[in-house]
Image: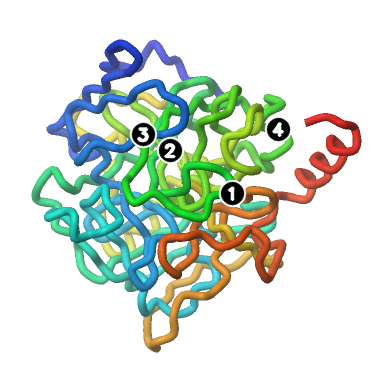
Amino acid sequence: MMFVAIFFFVVCIFQQGNGALYQCNASAACGCSNPSTLLTRIVGGENAVTNSWSWAISLRHDGSHFCGGSILSSSFIITAAHCIDGITNLVGYSILAGSIYLNSLLSASSQIRSISAIYKHPYYNDRRMTNDVALLLLSAPLNMTNHNLKPICLPSGTVAQPPDNIDMVAVGWGTTSSGSNTVSQDLLQVTLQSIPSASSSCRPYIYDSQKQFCAGVPAGGKDTCQGDSGGPLMAFVNNLWQVDGLTSYGYGCAYPNVAGVYTRVSNYINWIQTTMSIKAITVVTTSTTTRPTPTTTTTRRPTTITTTTTTRRPTTITATTTTGRPTTTTGRPTTTTGRPTTTASTTIRSTATTKAGRNSLPNRVVEFLVQTLFNGKR
């Protein structure tokens, strides 16, 4: 694992009692919507303050939340591939932006856009959950003229990010405990730590450390969960927030010594830039914003799973009929499942659904869990 020299970072983080106050560069093109963001050190998550994470979006079907995502530009959203895998018709699919509430009527700044095309990574593998990244093209650009909406920065892509053992922040509308069936109506934020891939809390659950990384809290109690899939895991770099991870999968939620697994965004910068260039959209990274020379340094998947084992080709889908979102959305595992929610209301599907296997943990993870179970170990 490559380490980045943390002392090169010029970050403004002030400790205030039991919290950390992050002060970002509000004049930058990305990664700062509220100049000051306070994160308290509490068990579990906490409600996000309005405009703190103005790039966070809710991915919806027929108005119901099932995954998260982040704004990269006025026309493009980044999310997890498993959130949109299997969708063959885009009627009824939309994103909600500019609101910390799932009820768009509670925020005057809410913007809703339908989705006109999906770009899934060409080598997404739904068995190993590698290359779990996708882009969504909106039907009309978002209005980005005020601080209610701003894109998230991308990492430079020159080195693997994030480095190990740094504080990171995840946001989403997912459930607040493993096994819960109700997503949060308010956007939540939680501070996690990036975990070395060789750690015992990461190694059994990760497949490819170049494409994925782990984050969590060794003692448990903090994590992303069902309904958070596709949402950002963020690092504070050069006084700006950048999306280093996409919520992908995990074993349960917030268990001690069991880290969650996230897509390593820095591995996909070229693919992201190339895909977005199809529509001549410029993506802002932490190396192109107007601030000092950048350095390099993020709730979960759908609850249902399928048995597909093949790597799918990139898909660009346009809505032409009136059928709805498939009934088998993928997700972050609680036992062997993943982390978006269902499309009916704001509850997640049962973790034991049809088409079992699609979003299951990699085979070697299952073998590890079986062995430790019979050995009487965690």
Q: Nearer the viewer, residue 226 or 297?
A: 226
Please tell me how crowded label 1 is: few (under 14), some (14-19), or many (20+) other residues with Cα within 10 Å: some
Q: Residues within 10 Å of mark 2 (few under 14, many from 20)?
A: many
Tell me if 288 is positioned left or right of 315 in this view. Answer: left
Q: Position of residue 181 (x, y in %)?
A: 52, 55
Q: Is residue 68 left or right of residue 287?
A: right
Q: Of marks 2 and 1, which one's residue comes earlier in the chain?
A: 1
Task: Tell me the number on the disc at residue 233.
Answer: 2
Determine which quarter of the picture holds residue 122: bottom right
Q: Earlier along the polypeptide chain: callout 4 or callout 1?
A: 1
Residues under labels 2 and 3: Cα distance?
15 Å
Q: Which mark sits nearer the N-terminus, 1 or 3?
A: 3
Q: Residue at x 27, y 51 (%)?
A: 101
Query: Which mark lies nearer to you, 4 or 1?
Result: 1
x, y (%) of residue 289? 22, 35
Amino acid carrying label 3: it is Glu
C-alpha span from label 1 to label 3: 19 Å
Q: Which residue is mark 3?
A: 46
Residue 298: in sight, yes or no? no
Mark 4 or mark 2: whose residue is earlier in sequence: 4
Q: Nearer the viewer, residue 142 or 42?
A: 42
- How many circles with numbers are drawn on the protein? 4
Lower position in the chain sequence, tag 3 or tag 4: 3
User: Is residue 70 something that shows in the picture?
Assistant: yes
